[in-house]
Image (cartoon, helix red, strand yellow):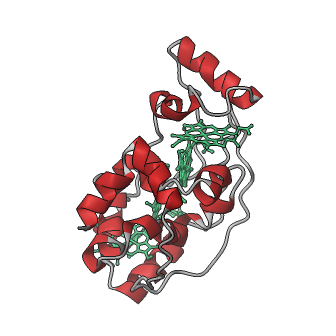
Amino acid sequence: MKALKYLLASTFVTVFFIVGSSHNLTFAVDAKPPGGSHDGVDVPQPIEFPHDIHVEINKINCMYCHTYARRSKVAGIPPTSKCMGCHKIIATDKPRIQKLTEYWTKGESPNWKKVHDVPDFVHFTHERHIKRFVFDQDYPVEDVKEVCAFCHGQVKNMTVAHKVKPLTMGWCVSCHEANGGPGDCWKCHK
Ligand code: HEC
Ligand code: HEC
Ligand code: HEC
Ligand code: HEC
Ligand code: HEC
């Protein structure tokens, strides 16, 4: 069932279908989320990408765009072809969409700048965390943003993505201690 929901959420048509559904159940994630905050700046991007318009207003799932989060180390930034699936027809009169369309016509992608970046000697993987906090406990995939928020804050409200959690060693370790994650140095350091 949860796999099916994910598949449904991954198709263009059902993205809009979900907008229309009025389901409003709230589940609590079985987790003790870490505290702490970080005052990150808005990273200048080639096109200011509004997460709020997509996630909060149009109810598009985080993993519709960041498709690899559930199965690999990285979450992935969507290719321009995915944007154009909608923006060939949506908001074509807006300057930012015209800029996006220019990249697309030239066969290029905007050079998105990194917002979150742990040093290369740190081993981090999205997959294990998404599995543990979403799939292992049948947490509804449409609410995955609440799990992303443990480490990225409320991206759904951001007009430009910025870093709001520390992502330091002490911070990672405190969450591992609270939730039964590994404590061995070599798990996080290759
Ligand atoms: C599932 C459909 C969908 C996808 C995929 C999508 N968008 Fe959008 N996007 C929208 C909708 C709907 C709006 C709101 C349009 C409006 O307000 O008229 C929007 C608005 C925007 C805006 C604001 C435009 C403005 O100035 O008001 C930008 C910028 C944008 N999208 C960029 C992107 C980029 C970049 C991607 C790919 C990473 C993308 N979008 C993928 C549906 C989508
Ligand atoms: C319509 C596609 C789309 C959706 C839906 C979407 N994102 Fe993004 N996301 C992007 C794009 C494009 C970027 C790169 C631009 C940027 O960093 O602002 C990005 C960047 C990010 C970044 C920063 C990446 C870095 O470099 O560190 C995070 C974190 C992120 N998204 C999390 C989320 C979360 C959490 C959700 C759900 C609440 C979500 N995204 C929903 C397209 C999307
Ligand atoms: C347990 C903490 C944690 C959770 C939960 C988490 N992330 Fe991340 N995320 C990170 C860290 C740490 C990085 C930086 C990784 C690096 O620099 O190698 C990152 C990087 C990213 C990036 C940019 C690089 C990449 O991997 O593509 C995106 C996009 C992103 N996360 C999206 C998401 C989304 C969407 C979710 C929820 C489905 C999510 N993250 C859940 C910790 C987390
Ligand atoms: C929300 C709490 C939380 C945060 C924040 C968090 N982790 Fe975890 N992490 C866990 C839990 C719980 C597990 C164990 C998952 C399992 O075994 O199912 C885990 C597992 C791991 C693993 C083990 C993967 C494997 O293959 O055994 C690594 C590596 C890891 N985390 C690195 C990090 C790093 C680096 C950070 C900080 C950037 C971080 N984690 C932040 C809760 C967290
Ligand atoms: C849960 C994941 C995690 C575990 C477990 C962990 N570390 Fe780290 N470590 C990190 C992260 C993330 C960073 C980079 C961010 C920072 O510097 O705080 C880091 C940074 C470091 C650094 C560089 C600090 C600096 O100032 O540049 C050292 C040295 C280090 N760790 C040693 C250790 C040792 C020794 C252990 C075991 C006792 C350990 N780590 C366990 C996640 C972890």
Q: In this view, does 2 lie to the left or right of 122?
A: left
Which of the two residues, 145 or 188, is positioned nearer the viewer here? Answer: 145
Q: In this view, does 72 lie to the left or right of 150?
A: left
Picture quarter with the C terminus: bottom left
- Answer whether residue 95 is visible to the viewer in this image: yes
Which residue is pictured at 44% across the width and 83% down the height? 27
- Answer whether residue 66 is visible to the viewer in this image: no
Which residue is pictured at 35% across the width and 76% down the height? 139
Which of the two residues, 15 or 163, is positioned nearer the viewer here? Answer: 15
Picture quarter with the N terminus: bottom left
Q: How many marks?
A: 0
Which residue is pictured at 48% across the width and 41% down the height? 77
Residue 145 x/y as whole percent = 50, 65
Position of residue 110 relative to residue 168, above or below, is: above
Residue 46 x/y as whole percent = 68, 31
Which of the two residues, 130 or 163, is positioned nearer the viewer here? Answer: 130
Which residue is pictured at 53% across the width and 80% down the height? 34
Residue 162 x/y as whole percent = 67, 54
Q: Residue furthest top?
A: 106
